[in-house]
Image (spheres, grey):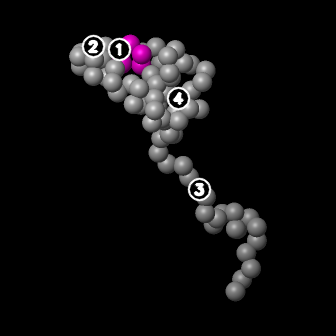
Amino acid sequence: MIPMSDSMNDDFALKKVRIGAKPFVRPHDDRIILGVCSGIARKLGINSMASRVIFSLLTLFTGGSLAIVYPIIFLLSPSE
């Protein structure tokens, strides 16, 4: 068996690669009520104010059913 040098080991070493999106968390620094819309904005990569407006409009269009979903998301999501 031929011994391999350290540089060869680095070339053939297994490297951890993070694939996928970052987990959903509620940030501390961009909260207005509970941080759910801010967390959604970070997850989607959009402005937090846009997320709040979209969430509010969708709440109005769905007859308020998202107002029930909001505290459920709060309870299930971890804080940053």
Q: Residue under label 4, please give it.
A: 26
Is mark 4 in CB contact (under 8 Å) with mark 1?
A: no
Magenta segment includes 53:
yes
Indicate which disc residue 56 carries.
1
Q: Is residue 39 above or below residue 5?
A: above
- Residue 44 shows in the view: no
Residue depicted at 70% across the width and 68% down the height: 8
Please name the amino acid that badge 4 sits on: Arg
Q: Residue under label 2, please give it.
A: 60
Q: Earlier in the sequence, mark 2 or mark 4?
A: 4
Please name the amino acid that badge 1 sits on: Ser
Which of discs 4 and 3 lies nearer the camera? The answer is 4
Residue range highlighted in magenta: 51-56
Judge the density around disc 2: few (<14), some (14-19), many (≥20) Cα neighbours within 10 Å: few
- What secondary structure is marked by label 1? helix
Which of discs 3 and 2 lies nearer the camera? The answer is 2
Is mark 1 in CB contact (under 8 Å) with mark 3?
A: no
